[in-house]
């Protein structure tokens, strides 16, 4: 039995219709994947989509840095839907194809750009260690600034919630690249 709830857009409650239309008329342009699941709880959907809009479109991080953090999060949570949607976007905004491939395999990658390396290291440590070391924090603070570090935690947290929703409610993968299954424990992701 699938856990993925069906959503009849013709039978939405007033609260569901309001948030549905807010999402559809916003920068996302459509209501797909975990957003459709969240519509089962309009109050959650309202708050979560607002956070998501900030995390994806309005944070102080550039799109390339934001998408890099999203990819690390999608890989950590083995979130196929998120990966299939964001891997192409990440490459379009400048995440190197070799980095995307390494992340898909949960391998460490060395970037030539200091900001990208800081985001990668920060996001990896945050997921694996549930914190970041002083060295990683200080490096990110120096490369990105304090507001960017706060936004980076927010992006990782928001996409963790997205990934949890995807995984718990069996949200089908999208049409983009598939996230490979890995035969290594989480503790060995990214060479840790």
Image (cartoon, rainbow, N blue to C red):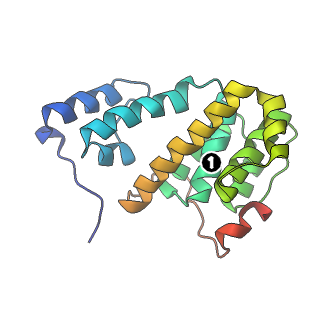
- The image shows residue 91 at horizontal and vertical percentages of 67, 40
Residue 77 versus residue 63: which sits nearer the camera? 77
- The image shows residue 72 at horizontal and vertical percentages of 65, 50
Which quarter shows the C terminus? bottom right
**Residue 94 visible somewhere in the drawing:** yes
- The image shows residue 81 at horizontal and vertical percentages of 47, 53
Question: Which quarter of the picture shows residue 130?
Answer: bottom right
Q: Residues within 10 Å of mark 1 (few under 14, many from 20)?
A: many
**Residue at the spot x=65%, y=76% of the render?**
183
Task: Report which residue position mark 1 lands on.
Answer: 71
Relative to 85, residue 93 above or below = above
SS at circle 1: helix
Which quarter shows the N terminus? bottom left
Tell whether 1 sits left or right of 68. Answer: left
Number of labelled discs?
Answer: 1
- The image shows residue 18 at horizontal and vertical percentages of 22, 28
Tell whether 114 sits left or right of 14. Answer: right
**Residue at the spot x=64%, y=23% of the render?**
60
**Residue 33 visible somewhere in the drawing:** no
Question: Which quarter of the picture shows residue 76?
Answer: bottom right
**Residue at the spot x=69%, y=63% of the render?**
105
């Amino acid at each position: 039995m699938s856990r993925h709830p069906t959503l009849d857009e013709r039978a939405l409650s007033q609260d569901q219709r309001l948030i549905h239309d807010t999402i559809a008329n916003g920068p996302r342009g459509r209501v797909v994947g975990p957003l459709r699941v969240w519509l089962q709880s309009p109050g959650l959907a309202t708050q979560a989509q607002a956070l998501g809009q900030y995390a994806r479109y309005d944070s102080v991080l550039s799109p390339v840095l934001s998408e890099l953090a999203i990819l690390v999060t999608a890989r950590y949570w083995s979130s196929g839907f998120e990966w299939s949607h964001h891997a192409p976007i990440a490459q379009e905004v400048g995440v190197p194809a070799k980095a995307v491939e390494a992340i898909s395999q949960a391998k460490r990658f060395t970037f030539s750009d200091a900001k990208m390396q800081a985001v990668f290291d920060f996001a990896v440590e945050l997921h694996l260690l549930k914190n970041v070391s002083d060295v990683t924090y200080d490096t990110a603070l120096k490369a990105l600034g304090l507001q960017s570090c706060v936004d980076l935690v927010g992006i990782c947290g928001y996409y963790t919630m997205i990934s949890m929703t995807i995984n718990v409610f069996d949200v089908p993968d999208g049409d983009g690249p598939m996230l490979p299954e890995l035969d290594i424990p989480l503790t060995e992701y990214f060479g840790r």
